[in-house]
Amino acid sequence: MSAKTEQAKLIENYINLKASTDDQHLVCLMFKDLRRKMGGLPVSAPVKRVFSNIDPKDVVNKLYQPPGANAQKEVWNTFNNAQLSALVPHIRMFMRNRSGGKYNSEEIPLQNIHNKLDVLKSPDKQNALFGLKNMNFQLSGQYPESARSDIDATITFYGNNLSVFEKNPLYTDLIVIEGHNKAEYDERNIIVQIGWARPTGQTLNNLNFTKPQLAALDSQVQAFKLSYTKHSFNFNIDGSFTLSVDYVAQADKTVATADFLSTSALIKEVYGGNTKIKKVSAQEKNLIHKYIETNHAGASDISKKNIFSTLSHAGTETHNLFRTRYLEATKKEIKNILSKMSFRTFKISTYKRNSMLLKQAAKRMIRDSKKGGSSKETALIAAASAPGDNGSQPLNIMEFHPENNMSNIAPATIASRVNSSAKETPTIANQSIADDQLPKLKFLKVTTFAACISGLIQANPDLVSSFKQKKINICFGPIKFIPGDMTGPRVMSLGDIPVTYFLINKVLNEIYVSKVKNKLTLGNFLNKMLFYIKKYYMEGDFVFDSGRLMSAGTMRTIQVVCTPTSLTKPGAVRQFAKNVTGVNVEENFIVLAGPAADKPEVPSEYDSYIAGSTNSIIKKLNFTQSNSQVMQAHRDDNITATYRSAKGQVLPQLYNVNMEIVGNMNFIPGYTFNLVPTVVGVNPAARGNIIETLGITGVYWATRIEHTIGQNGFTTKLDAYNVASPTGPHSRRKKKKKKGKKGKKGK
């Protein structure tokens, strides 16, 4: 590339950056300096930080590992076919209610319909049959831009006639949502305990189950805390029926409905504080409940009662009027929320801003050409600053340094001053600024992701109370990324990621202000913020790479229910699952974390599953080559490494895998494991080398899980992708250190 071409390209890149950059992009470019000055911003319950210093892909393993996990790393490769055939799923269901701050829990009696289900309790009435037919749990564990729940469950029941609902009110509670059978909006949820029943009697003795196998079965138990969404009946000619009920995780529903704007004060302003309810028809009652669920699902119980009371007196024809009145009132509430949020206001000179962008433009040219370094960067800037043949200045050099007259300065000196301006440290703007200085300064209002979410929740006292009552915590886990002003990856708490007033306001406009929305929920806000954090911090330069580079994984959430203060204690989650009969003891944790980071792995750190062996729990296995752009970059690295080594070997690939296995509750979205396929017809001594060369073995990260329990037993289906190939640049093998004397390189 000629000097003139380089000059033109650098100027083009700079102009593009200057036109497209925004406040959040600037923060990414100054991450190191800003991060040092972001401490002290208030973060209050229910917001917490967990596992801030571990690789994001290990979070689920830390949360869900059972006691004695090291002894179970290979245990699922030891069950023979006779043992697997004898296993029986274990299921218990409980109805949990909260009224007036008090909880009560009652087990739901279920008739055993299938021999493969361990649901042995029968209804009280001899002729009434109500049992479990099928259960399906889908665990996504990811937050795409469009909102959806992390845990979806469909439970299908069988009954011989509708009289079962009269004989046991618990069955009715399975399908009646809060507020529809009475004016109160009491909390109600279903707790489902799932696992494998421990073999007993002759089964235990005849099939020679080992102690590690029994311990593995005992540790399989999981518990899901669910809230009702919808149901459907299917009736047969003889009066029997199937009832299919859809649930979501209770924490999912709370986050999805937690409305920042439905404060008690705003509800009272719009609807009044009347609590005396007028008797209305069943049809009108349902319309009022539908209005409340559509517009104010996240409001407090008292606020819902106020709305119900007002609408019962006003009549259904006034619903749209109240809705319009409420939407008008929320406009000022958004401004009020933002005014109460804690920010740090930083100032930088416009010279620093422009110098940073010019240097970023030079770095991009160097990266694209794969030549040079800091000296090349300085040379490029100097060349761009040099006058043209006619004496014209290609760049307005006055943009880069507070010098009144730079026209006669040598290009090398200009480049030096650009470097000097770019290194200027941002300072907190806590003093008044003279009017004549304002045009020379750029101001950035910055907070942290955790402080942002904490501020939004704290702005609505009803939300604080709701999260406290339901014992729901929003936890920020780790994220691994490369900040714009640093050369290597960094692991830190997702909650400590700097976010700007600009980005927060942008998100609010996209999800609420620019649309005709009824509510501004925590779920929608988190979804969109995670989408942009990934875009700014994990997909290269926001301007140059936007829309081109995609990270391999997705920002995700992890649902955890365990005893209080025990979140990070090994086995805490499993221990709670074993003791779900208690009331008012558990806490719900929604852990936000980054995608699985790509780095060399040590196989012994993770559980191993062998495919193709006689004792394998894997029923089906399908590999597909990963098509993500990040994985394509990995393959390009492998190609380069192969050519440089002058070896004509098969290149290892990175794969997605789809598996169907014997039911296994170890598999949670984000679960990291070793997958070792065997190769039929190949000399056993050569198997390891072949599967490593092909790249079908390695460390995998689960993304989507589906557990199904029914007539055909207990099955788990999952999708996972390879995060570490066993050969090439991402090898799990440790490099051998060269021998030599201390302080000297080995020969």
Image (tube, helix red, strand yellow):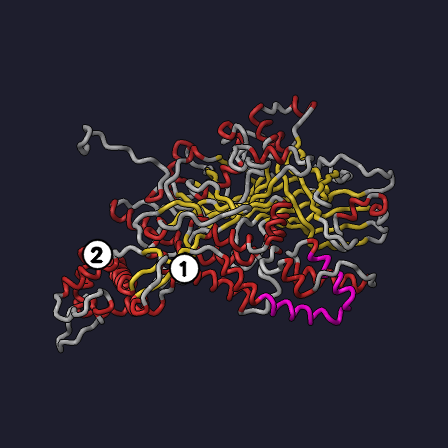
Q: Position of residue 715 (x, y in %)?
A: 62, 42
Q: Can I make out residue 409 in this image?
A: yes
User: Which residue, as the protein is rendered here, is positioned at the far bottom?
Assistant: 390
Amino acid at pointer 2: Lys
Amino acid at pointer 1: Lys
Residue 650 to residue 70: above or below: below
Q: Nearer the viewer, residue 625 or 229?
A: 229
Q: Which mark is residue 445?
A: 1
Q: Position of residue 317 (x, y in %)?
A: 75, 71
Please tell me which residue is depicted at 20% across the width and 55% down the height of the picture.
374
| Left or right of residue 415, residue 659 in this image | right
Would residue 326 be counted in the magenta stretch?
A: yes
User: How many neighbours does mark 1 have within 10 angstroms: few (below 14), some (14-19), or many (20 or more)?
Assistant: some
Q: Mark 2 = which residue?
A: 371
| Left or right of residue 718, residue 41 in this image | left
Q: Which residues are magenta?
A: 303-330
Q: Position of residue 500 (x, y in %)?
A: 42, 59
SS at circle 1: strand
Q: Looking at the rendering, in which quadrant would you find the C terminus?
A: top left
User: Which residue, as the protein is rendered here, is positioned at the far top?
Assistant: 205
Main secondary structure along the magenta-highlighted residues = helix
Distance from the alpha carbon under mark 2 to that under mark 1: 37 Å
